[in-house]
Amino acid sequence: MVVVGAGVVGAAIARELARHPLRIAVLDAAEDVGEGSSKANTAILHTGFDAVPGTLEARLVREGHRLLTAYAAETGIPVEPVGALLVAWDGTQLAALPALAAKAEANGHRTTRLIDADELYTREPHLGPGALGALEVPGESLICPWTTVLAYAVQAVRAGVDLHLNCRLEGVTEDVSGTGTVHELLSSRGRLRTRYLVNAAGLYTDEVDRLLGYRDFTVTPRRGQLLVFDAFARSLVRHILLPVPTALGKGVLVAPTVHGKVLLGPTAEDLDPSEKTATGSTQEGTARLREQGARILPELVAEEVTAVYAGLRAATGQEDYRITAHPGRRCVTVGGIRSTGLTASLAIARHVAGLLADTGLDLDPGAVRPLPPVRMPNLGEAFPRPYADARLIAADPAYGTVVCHCERVTLGEIRDALASELPPVSPGGLLRRTRALAGRCQGFACGAAVRALLEGAAR
Amino acid sequence: MDVLVVGAGPAGLAAAAGLASAGAGAVEVLERESAPGGALRYLRSPGPGLPLGGPGYARWLTTAALRAGAVLRTGVSATGWADLPDTGAGPGPGAVETTGPGGLERITARAVVLATGARERPRSARLVPGTRPAGVLTTGELLRSVELFGQRVGERAVVVGGGPVARRAVLALRRSGTEVAAVVAEEAVGGWRRSAGGLGGPVPLLRGARVTGLAGRGRLSGVAVAGPDGRTAVLGCDTVVFTGDWVPDQVLARYGGVVLDPGTGGPAVDAGFRTSAPGVFAVGNTLHAVERAPSAAAEGRAVAGPVLDFLRGGGPWPAGPVPVRVAGPLRWAVPNLLVPGAAAPDAVRLRALRPLPRPVVVEVRQDGRLLARHRLRSPLGPDRSASLPGGWVDRVDPAGGPVRIAVR
């Protein structure tokens, strides 16, 4: 069994299949897990209240929300169930709220509630003037996207999955000489034979499909630029403030992050299918976001921006996932996972396992083994962190030695990340495991020390 | 504890030395890094204000503080405040919460001196578009890498900014074996040609140009630059150093609810370095980003008197001081609070957003009333302060509005 792609979806699939006595390998062209859209999204655990009822996406997001909420509690992935408010800024948006509440109900969410301007401003006192009301959506939560991918991948690796990074899939041939088709994969790191194949290559799902001879869809990246504001902005906002989608377009959201900052974005820019690496921010994009943010939360834009990033959604021209089994070829394509892949990941993994079983993969329930437990280091501000944990520091003073002062990341946490079974190979990888370098000074104070630790570990 | 000093850079060390030798009692300095000195640690080569280089000066200041009887603790981070007093009428500062290898502490002192320094604004805060590759630094990170860790940061670098810090960046890059592809300076201050010898050769200076984007995946591959004529080009490089654009490191002050000055972005202070929080003083570059190390140290020495007065019960904490505001092209004024009846500042230091052609005449007004008109003696710019003598301060109306300083 080979899974192509070690993003949040591929890692979740590998983890799900690792319950079974299979030989599993995961391939990814990048140097780390979760290097594509999985690391650059809005970091929200969605309820799926606004999905198109009856779609596969609606079902998997609803299931995934439940599964990931439970998994996060079990593994220490930080989640904050702050809830969302869809804020209406004009009559058209206000008029659209009841229909959204009805849609939520059709999706099985009966707890939404319309609130008037007075209650809205009581609950969000820093909101800019002119809001007319809101739809409250309980259950929308903040989550750490980095820890989620890592938890899946670490658990899969502990269960025996082989993770091949820096391993680009370059060709697929079929060997039909034996009993049933065997895929022969040519990768940048050598050849691999597998009976079953899952294509979870994210933005590159269409290209991997073409290697298999399928031309069902083309991935057109839709870029979303986001601004991250300094931790001092966190007290300005209590909920996820969502835009009300109307015929005139979709606005931007303002949301706290579990890391104690505030997100503003995303833009929605349709790119050319060839621009799958166009993750740069633009001057127009950030300027427009700041304009929109200034209206939603005027005090926000006075705070420092600690990061600007852009993620690419894997749009395929269809407002649903494109998860397709090819039974004769013993492969499954997991495409079109756009904005909700993080939320739905565990449900997608179950769904894909079911499809694989339909194509003949032996997933005998009697042979299922429990997955080895994982407990992830906490990166969430709402939960105890090592620098503030007297008992931990007493047991190991490295947890009292702060290296990254902005984010208060300690030597103990960096050391643990470097010694883990999935160690970082870049400053960005270390950031996603510890938050080191993610603060307002961006390495002015600790960049050199962090680089020395990374280089020391590499030797 | 009588006085807790947060930060062992030039300002904090000088404050500790001054306080301990003046008999302030138990004086302790906290430093989050592993060694004292602050920026002096990595300002290794001689430069403006540092004829003998930074590390020697740091050792001298440290020895002076220790000899005077101050206690220095390194590797300890101040993370916040506990038991915050009511603003205005509290008996003294709250306890400072710390983290260190020895555990968590709450340090209660009768007075706290904030000397937390300054930092450069990084690429993200400057909203420079493009990708997010490795190889994007500030001067602070570059100098630490080269001087403290012996690292070589890359093969070929572009330096952004034209001020004195940019020259330090060029020197550090060249000394560590990194080629300097260009210095991109929207507003270069003079002296680049003159200093070429000290910088190891002529510097490819792109005056009037600005960086419009970064490119590269994984590692930086180039920097897009727009010239004054609007033409653009991409400079191939694997490293870019953003220099200058200093801001006070005021995190602890802000956590403590200390009022910040809109011009400096650091704690607002009066002539005695008193902040809005009773018992909390601030000195050095957390007040004004940035002055040279000797100037920060001078403030450290000068805070001893006001702190001693406070410890000896010298009157109530000033309430309702008159703020000093500046209008563009001025950027900030320090001190920026005036306390009628208290010792007036000898001078107010002014900084501008851009180099101002001489002569610069400034006017000081309160509620429209002209308090002073003064021709500044020294040039004024983003990297150079000028002094405005404070002879007008006794004419400030304690019940009036803010004092406003503007360029005429």
Image (cartoon, grey):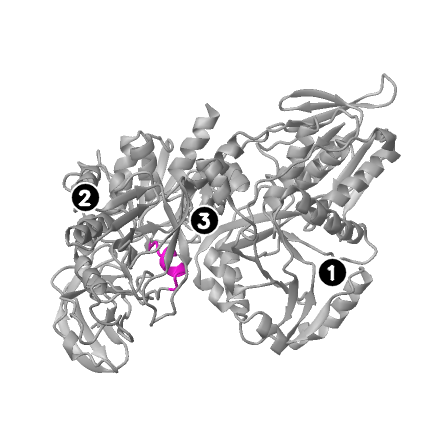
- Crowding at mark 3 (Cα within 10 Å: few <14, some 14-19, many 20+): many
Q: Amino acid at mark 1?
A: Asp
In the visual, does B331 lie left or right of A393? left
Chain identifier of the residue bearing label 3 in the image:
A
Q: Give residue A50's mark.
A: 1
Q: Give residue A369's mark.
A: none
User: Of A33 and B208, which appears nearest the observer?
Assistant: A33
Chain identifier of the residue bearing label 2 in the image:
B
| Residue A250 image point, x, y percent | 65, 63
Q: Is residue B244 above or below residue A403?
A: below
**Residue B221 visible here:** no
Q: CA distance from mark 3 to mark 2?
A: 30 Å
Q: Which residue carries the number 3 mark?
A: A439
Q: Is residue B127 above or below residue A329?
A: below
Which dot, 1 or 2, sits closer to the camera? Answer: 2
Q: Quadrant of residue A173?
A: top right
Quadrant in the picture for the C terminus of chain B:
bottom left
Label 3 element class: loop
Q: Give residue B61's mark.
A: 2
Label 2 element class: helix
Q: Amino acid at mark 3?
A: Gly
Q: Which residues are magenta?
A: B248-257
| Residue A90 image point, x, y percent | 63, 75
In the image, is residue A28 part of the stretch drawn in magenta?
Answer: no
| Residue B12 image point, x, y percent | 25, 50
Which dot, 3 or 2, sits closer to the camera? Answer: 2
Q: CA distance from mark 1 to mark 2?
A: 63 Å
| Residue B54 image point, x, y percent | 21, 40
Q: Do the residues under discs 1 and 3 have CB atoms within 8 angstroms?
A: no
**Residue B31 visible here:** yes
